[in-house]
């Protein structure tokens, strides 16, 4: 996952949201995206490069089962001692204000003192569902926020209790195997075997149809394939996830497909009549649209062999 650009920071010089880095694991250090409330001390930290995470968003209508957002990506969990002289509300409001100031979107918040998080057994419920330990059955505040920048997304879960604070950061991404750019021979093999092949490594900014410069290695391989097979004609098919309206996604996917065609024609000297750009929006998902990881896989460009 590429780096997020810098976020706005500082709130009463106690909490900051800053620029995350892709640094190696460092024990007992703050996550660079969220620094702790002043005076907090780390008790433990856990980093997993790729795993599942259930982001808590409340309870079901019956109040019996937790609900949430299923996420996949790099997960960092940091558990802090809260300064004893600071109240739950003071610490939580600092975090909340810093999140808002950064431009992040708060998706859910609750106050356990009013039993807004869980009616009964809040501690065990949150521990089991999201590995949140700071909130007890009687007290604690929680928020879940989402940070989006271009095609990068991170979720931040913050729980402040009487004695402790949980900070969980989930940097959403597809497994590394989903980011490998196929070479020309692999693209050709996929077309020969299945009649279609996903071209990994073609990138667009969110809601945009301009091919990013980082797509060039993948486009070079597509051009090599077409150059080596002068009788091969293809459909270039754009796919999106299901966020937004169907018509918007259909048009966006078609524009992206046509943008790929234009780059191949103008920069790689592929005859226009050999390429036909079309978009199917979210109609042919590769993975579940219920998770960020799945949606990332569904945003793709596919070559389909045609006569």
Image (cartoon, rainbow, N blue to C red):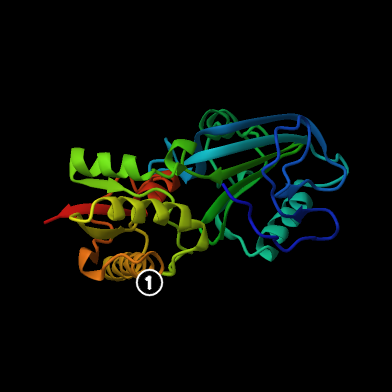
- The residue at the far left in this view is 307
**The C terminus appears in which quarter of the rendering?**
bottom left
Q: How many marks?
A: 1
Give percent across and percent down for residue 113.
64, 44
Tell whether 295 sits left or right of 149. left
- Front residue of 17 and 251: 251
101 above or below 182?
Answer: below
Give percent across and percent down for residue 41.
83, 36
Answer with the quarter of the image where residue 241 lies. Answer: bottom left
The residue positioned 33% from the left and 57% from the top of the image is: 242
Q: Secondary structure at mark 1?
A: helix
- Front residue of 151 and 261: 261
248 above or below 227?
Answer: below
Tell whether 96 sits left or right of 227. right
**Can residue 95 be seen by looking at this rendering?**
yes
Give percent across and percent down for residue 265.
33, 69
- Classify 10 Å Cα crowding around label 1: few (below 14), some (14-19), many (20 and above): few
Answer with the quarter of the image where residue 183 lies. Answer: top left
**Can residue 70 be seen by looking at this rendering?**
no
Answer with the quarter of the image where residue 127 lies. Answer: top right
The residue positioned 18% from the left and 55% from the top of the image is: 231
The residue positioned 51% from the left and 62% from the top of the image is: 213
- Front residue of 97 and 300: 300
Q: Which residue is mark 1?
A: 266
- Front residue of 181 and 3: 181
270 above or below 177?
Answer: below
Tell whether 239 sits left or right of 234. right
Give percent across and percent down for residue 306.
15, 56
The residue positioned 29% from the left and 71% from the top of the image is: 251
């Amino acid at each position: 996952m590429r780096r997020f650009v810098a976020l706005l920071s500082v709130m009463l010089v106690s909490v900051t949201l800053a620029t995350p880095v892709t640094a190696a694991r460092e024990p007992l250090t703050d996550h660079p995206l969220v620094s702790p409330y002043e005076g907090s001390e780390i008790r433990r930290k856990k980093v997993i490069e790729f795993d599942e995470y259930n982001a808590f968003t409340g309870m079901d209508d019956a109040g019996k089962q937790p609900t949430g957002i299923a996420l996949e990506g790099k997960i960092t969990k940091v558990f802090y001692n809260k300064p004893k002289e600071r109240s739950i509300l003071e610490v939580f409001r600092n975090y909340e204000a810093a999140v808002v100031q950064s431009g992040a979107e708060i998706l859910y918040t609750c106050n356990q003192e009013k039993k807004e998080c869980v009616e009964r057994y809040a501690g065990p419920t949150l521990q089991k569902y999201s590995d949140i330990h700071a909130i007890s059955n009687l007290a604690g505040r929680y928020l879940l926020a989402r940070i989006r920048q271009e095609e990068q997304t991170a979720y931040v879960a913050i729980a402040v209790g009487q004695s402790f604070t949980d900070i969980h950061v989930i940097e959403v991404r597809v497994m590394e195997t989903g980011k490998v750019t196929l070479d020309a021979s692999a693209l050709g093999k996929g077309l020969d075997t299945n009649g279609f092949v996903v071209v990994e490594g073609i990138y667009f900014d969110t809601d945009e149809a301009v091919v990013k410069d980082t797509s060039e290695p993948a486009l070079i391989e597509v051009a090599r394939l077409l150059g080596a097979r002068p009788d091969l004609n293809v459909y270039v098919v754009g796919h999106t996830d299901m966020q937004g309206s169907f018509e918007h996604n259909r048009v966006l996917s078609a524009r992206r497909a046509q943008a790929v065609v234009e780059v191949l024609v103008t920069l790689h000297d592929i005859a226009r009549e050999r390429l036909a750009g079309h978009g199917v929006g979210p109609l042919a998902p590769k993975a579940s649209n219920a998770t960020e990881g799945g949606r990332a896989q569904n945003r793709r460009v596919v070559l389909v062999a045609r006569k």
